[in-house]
Image (cartoon, grey):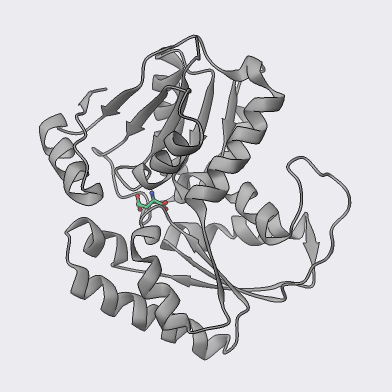
Amino acid sequence: MAMAVGVFDSGLGGLTVLQALRARLPEVPFVYLGDNAHAPYGTREADDIFRLTCAGVERLWDEGCDMVLLACNTASAAALRRMQETWVPADKRVLGVFVPLIEALTERQWGDNSPPREVAVRHVALFATPATVRSRAFQRELAFRAIGVDVEAQPCGGLVDAIEEGDTELAEALVASHVAALKRRMPAPEAAVLGCTHYPLMEAAFAEALGPGVRVFSQPDIVAESLADYLARRPEMLGPGTQPDFLTTGEPGRVGAQATRLLRRATAFRAA
Ligand code: DGL
């Protein structure tokens, strides 16, 4: 029987990643934990994000998930490296969403540790939360793998809130203005990275504002493909848990209703 893998997010946005994971790996039970009591992370300090993410990951270990994927870009950017270097025990794994994306962008295989090299893409626009942009984690991870790539990052203030409130008009206006601000600094990006769990829900608006000729990288499918590849090579990292589940640190009834509205699919949560 398949065993459980944990998926951690600051709140509900990670459900966009979970949907892709379930489609790609239907036999794996995923245990999702949303830290809704402390969301959003995108406007928090790095120390705070580290502490909260460690607490969430520990909770998923308690559920029998030896491996936890941080679906949250902000947690992946601001906390993951420090967790891996100082905190994760040898028999557990915590993975993030940035490395698979960068591997897709630089056309590398997972775990290819050869020196950084020149790649086809030269100008990359990154759209993310203020905390993700401030961490510079994307630029740091990219520099390990590619040389000569110019990254211009745009913190998209207000966008997560607008999407969660279901205010599509405001969300579209914010996408247009953030893309315009980015383009003033980088007029012709070849690729754009949607570096936040919520932004795939606005992918069409990003593509339209960016215009033709810009390749938009959205994480869910890329991350799902990477995880499938990882599990094929490291099946021992499937934890002992066997049941899919949805946990929240917030109020389960309210969070479930919000999740159902966001993804147009009924989802019931229980208290973490
Ligand atoms: N999950 C966060 C991310 O992917 C967005 C929501 C938040 O700020 O907590 O960056």
Residue 70 drawn at (x, y percent) = 48, 38
Residue 171 image-quadrant placement = bottom left
- Which residue is painted at 30% across and 66% down in the image? 159
Residue 224 drawn at (x, y percent) = 54, 41
Residue 26 or 167: which is nearer the viewer?
26
- Which residue is painted at 84% across and 44% down in the image? 113
Q: In the rendered image, is residue 183 in sight?
A: yes
Residue 154 or 20: which is nearer the viewer?
20
Residue 74 or 237: which is nearer the viewer?
237
Q: In this view, does 101 lie above or below 30?
A: below
- Quarter of the image that includes the C terminus: top left
Q: In the rendered image, is residue 85 in sight?
A: no
Q: Is residue 21 above or below residue 108?
A: above
- Which residue is painted at 55% across and 57% down in the image? 135
- Which residue is painted at 17% across and 66% down in the image? 167
Q: Residue furthest right?
A: 115
Residue 94 or 257: which is nearer the viewer?
257
39 sits left or right of 85 in the view: left
